[in-house]
Image: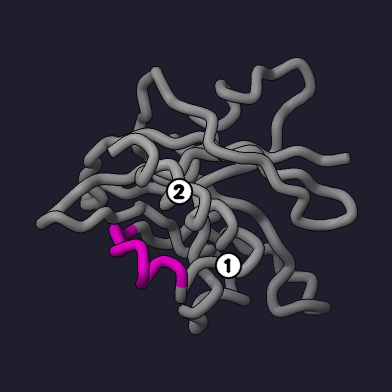
Amino acid sequence: MKRSAGILIYRKKEQKYQVFLAHMGGPFWQNINIGAWSIPKGEINQGEKIVDCARREFQEETGISIQPPITYLASKKVSHHKIVIIFTKEQDVDNSNFQSNFFSREFPKGSGIIRQFPEMDKAEWFDIDEAKKIINPKQLFFINRLEQYLKKTN
């Protein structure tokens, strides 16, 4: 079974909690907003510590470094073949220097033309209620879990 790890960072601004999400890149997602935002995450390499993967993937997909400590938030089986493990941390980051890694894909499909696309094409802060509306539905569980975590810790 594939495993992915990521970090859901949050901050408190004007007495409201916000989360930092990234918009999925590539031709399929370019004109989609609802359901196209994601927690920065990616596949765990063999032999890699889960927490190290989460930090590496956040860096690769946003260009932003998250320093330890980070706290385990939750794990969820999102498909028959994949488990997602998410950590969290309160950290205010500046998204003006956002920079994502790239992937290659044949586009248009069947054309034989291989093009490069950013894995994530932008990243922004959202109030939790707004984040619930735009996040990929398979990841809504993690936003809800973060709300529970914040209620316990405050």
**Magenta residues, as a range?**
124-132
Front residue (pair 41, 78): 78
Query: Earlier along the polypeptide chain: callout 1 or callout 2?
Result: 1
The residue drawn where x is 40% and y is 66% is: 131
SS state under label 2: helix
User: In the rendered image of this protein, does residue 127 appear above or below residue 19?
Assistant: below
| Residue that label 1 marks | 136
Task: Inspect the magenta stretch and tell me whether residue 99 lies in it.
Answer: no
Farthest residue in the bottom direction? 31
Q: CA distance from mark 1 to mark 2?
A: 19 Å
User: In the rendered image of this protein, does residue 75 appear above or below residue 145?
Assistant: above
Residue 23's x, y, as percent? Answer: 46, 64
Amino acid of disc 2? Gln
Amino acid of disc 1? Asn
**Cβ atoms under marks 1 and 2 closer than 8 Å:** no
| Residue that label 2 marks | 148
Q: Quadrant of residue 128?
A: bottom left
